[in-house]
Image: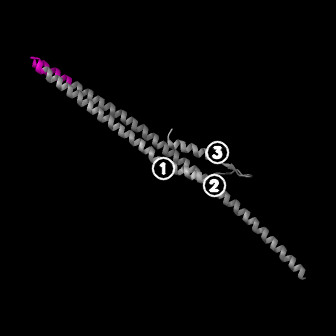
Amino acid sequence: MTNTDILLEDLEDVLDDATAIPLSKKSAVDVEKIKTIIEDIRLNTPQETKQAKAIVDSRNTILEDAKKEAAEIIKKAQAEARDLVARDEITKTAQAEATEIIAKANEQGKAMVQEAQNQASEILGNATTQANEMVTSAQNKSREMLSAVNNYADDTLLSIDDSLYKSLQDVRRIRQGISNAQNRKMD
């Protein structure tokens, strides 16, 4: 499980722990905690990219090792061919065997390099797919959270506005009552 997945689960926990607002379908959330988690997701995304790069570097190491091993096989085959020629008086037979060994070594080396390249490409493809899925998931969660936070802020401001409006009406009604009472006393 990646750090990003853990952070997304933390975010879901914050949303699950949200306090319900009475007489409303809305919930109060810890906005600072959500912002912190979003920032951690942003900071972690480069880490996931570093992991994908490490996989690519590993692929290059596999390729280099395969090339070295192929070169060693060819070198051994050539050395064996030279030894055969030096030891045996039948030069033609030794040369034919040496040529065959070198050809087989070349084929084996090429096959190993190709197999290593295929494996490295598959690893890189899988890593890229996983990284893209994690980034897409994090972006979707961020958008959902931002939308939820905006809706909560709008609802809260609307509620405050409604309360202020009612309070202002009460103050005006009280002032009118005081004014009417003073006018009656004067009459």
Instruction: Decide: few, some or many residues near mark 3? Use Cα within 10 Å; few <14, some 14-19, many ≥20.
Output: few
Instruction: Decide: few, some or many residues near mark 1? Use Cα within 10 Å; few <14, some 14-19, many ≥20.
Output: few
Task: Please tell me whether residue 84 belongs to the stretch shown in magenta.
Answer: no
Magenta stretch: give its range: 85-101
Q: Horizontal and vertical percent for residue 160? A: 70, 61
Q: Please state, as top left, top right, bottom left or bottom right, where the C terminus lies in the image.
A: bottom right
- Give the residue at mark 1: 43
Q: The disc labelled 3 sits on which kind of residue? A: Asp
Instruction: Decide: few, some or many residues near mark 2? Use Cα within 10 Å; few <14, some 14-19, many ≥20.
Output: few
| Residue at 67% from the left image edge and 57% from the top image edge | 155
Give the mark nearer the N terminus: 1 vs 3. Answer: 3
Could you tell me how far apart the alpha carbons at marks 2 and 1 are, in whole angstroms? 26 Å
Q: The disc labelled 2 sits on which kind of residue? A: Asn
Whether residue 143 sits left or right of residue 185 in the image: it is left
Could you tell me how far apart the alpha carbons at marks 2 and 3 are, in whole angstroms? 16 Å
Q: Horizontal and vertical percent for residue 9? A: 57, 42
Q: For residue 19, which numbered disc appears in the image?
A: none
Q: The disc labelled 1 sits on which kind of residue? A: Leu
Q: In terms of image quadrants, where is residue 172?
A: bottom right
| Residue at 70% from the left image edge and 59% from the top image edge | 159
Q: Horizontal and vertical percent for residue 19? A: 68, 49
Say if mark 2 contacts mark 3, CB within 8 Å: no
| Residue at 41% from the left image edge and 44% from the top image edge | 50
Query: Given the current orientation, which residue lies at the most extreme bottom position?
Result: 187
Q: For residue 16, which numbered disc appears in the image?
A: 3
Say if mark 2 contacts mark 1, CB within 8 Å: no
User: Of helix, strand and loop, which one carries label 1?
Assistant: helix
User: Of helix, strand and loop, which one carries label 3?
Assistant: helix
- Give the residue at mark 2: 151
Give the mark nearer the N terminus: 2 vs 1. Answer: 1
